[in-house]
């Protein structure tokens, strides 16, 4: 399956000195398309290192094991995340200034007629159509666990004082649990996927994100999303990839 078209944008925001977000797009001739967004963390620019390495290592692993995609794409994605995790941990052991670095990582993989979504942390993947915006991934964060337990509403996630505490990240612990979702595509319909860091979702409500998709041309959607996040404060780096399939 071929992903029709995409836009990828990143912006450091109004407050941060550096952009610790990173995105990567790979579109191959063999029906493989990979879209990744990462939000790094750690001092001494280590967040920038972690987010870029995670994306690159995941793609490296996928391409090195491309023969296995035909029968085990889901497992290959999980192993790619674990490979990136181990490599980032190894980087920290070799370079102590990078100690404590880690990153979220959200991915979308199109391969022939298959679509897989994966994530670690609180970067998200959504489906957007004319009727709704639906979050496919689940955040690995303290406040999202509180929301699932019924302790807070989804709206309270965005203002809760502990909203920045994530419970799972690439590069932090040896054992990494990876969420992977397989989607069945309705070939009669076209819809958008949106991958983004929390620099967007903490600033712009989901309902307004959907409205931006509805009211703007394809090329203008990304610029408008980032503009609205900046207008709302732009307190974090902002990264978006959206594609029409």
Image (cartoon, rainbow, N blue to C red):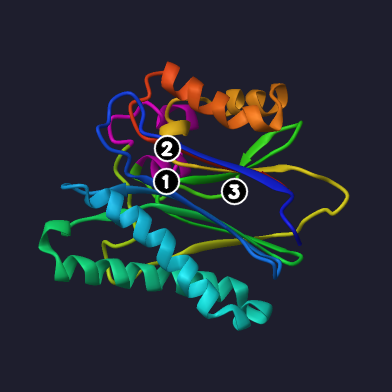
User: How far is mark 1 from mark 2, CA to CA?
Assistant: 7 Å
- Counting from the top left corner in percent of width and height, residue 75 is at 55, 75
Mark 1 — residue?
Answer: 122
Location of residue 218 (image quadrant)? top right
Asked if residue 39 is positioned above or below residue 80 in the image, the reply reads above
- Counting from the top left corner in percent of width and height, residue 135 is at 58, 42
The extreme left residue here reads 96
Location of residue 102 (image quadrant)? bottom left
Query: Quick check: can you spot residue 65?
Result: yes
Is residue 191 or residue 147 the one in the foreground?
191
Mark 3 — residue?
Answer: 136
Is residue 179 or residue 25 the one in the foreground?
25
Are circles 1 and 2 on residues that touch, CB within 8 Å? yes
Q: Label 2 crowding class (10 Å Cα cut-off): few <14, some 14-19, many 20+?
A: many
**Magenta-drawn stretch contains 161:** yes
Residue at screen point 50% across, 49% down: 138
Q: Which mark is residue 198?
A: 2
Q: Mark 3 or 2 closer to N-term?
A: 3
Are circles 3 and 2 on residues that touch, CB within 8 Å? no
| Residues in magenta, as a range | 143-163
Are circles 3 and 1 on residues that touch, CB within 8 Å? no
The extreme right residue here reads 188
Q: Quadrant of the N terminus?
A: bottom right
């Amino acid at each position: 399956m071929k992903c029709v078209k995409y836009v990828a944008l990143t912006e450091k925001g109004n407050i941060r000195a550096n952009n610790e977000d990173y995105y990567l797009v790979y579109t191959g001739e063999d029906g493989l398309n990979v879209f990744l967004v990462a939000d790094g963390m750690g001092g001494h620019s280590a967040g920038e290192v972690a987010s870029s390495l995670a994306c690159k290592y995941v793609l490296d692993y996928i391409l090195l094991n491309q023969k296995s995609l035909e029968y085990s794409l889901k497992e290959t994605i999980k192993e790619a995340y674990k490979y990136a995790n181990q490599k980032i941990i190894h980087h920290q052991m070799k370079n102590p200034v990078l100690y404590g670095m880690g990153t979220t990582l959200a991915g979308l993989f199109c391969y022939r007629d298959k679509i897989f979504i994966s994530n670690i942390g609180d970067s998200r993947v959504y489906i957007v159509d004319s009727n709704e915006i639906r979050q496919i991934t689940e955040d690995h964060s303290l406040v999202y666990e509180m929301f699932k337990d019924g302790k807070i509403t989804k709206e309270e996630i965005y203002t809760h004082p502990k909203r920045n505490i994530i419970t799972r990240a690439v590069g932090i612990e040896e054992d990494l649990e990876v969420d992977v979702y397989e989607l069945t595509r309705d070939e009669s319909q076209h819809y958008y996927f949106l991958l983004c860091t929390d620099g967007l979702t903490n600033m712009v409500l989901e309902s307004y994100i959907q409205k931006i998709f509805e009211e703007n041309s394809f090329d203008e959607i990304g610029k408008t999303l980032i503009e609205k996040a900046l207008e709302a404060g732009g307190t974090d780096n902002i990264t978006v990839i959206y594609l029409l399939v």
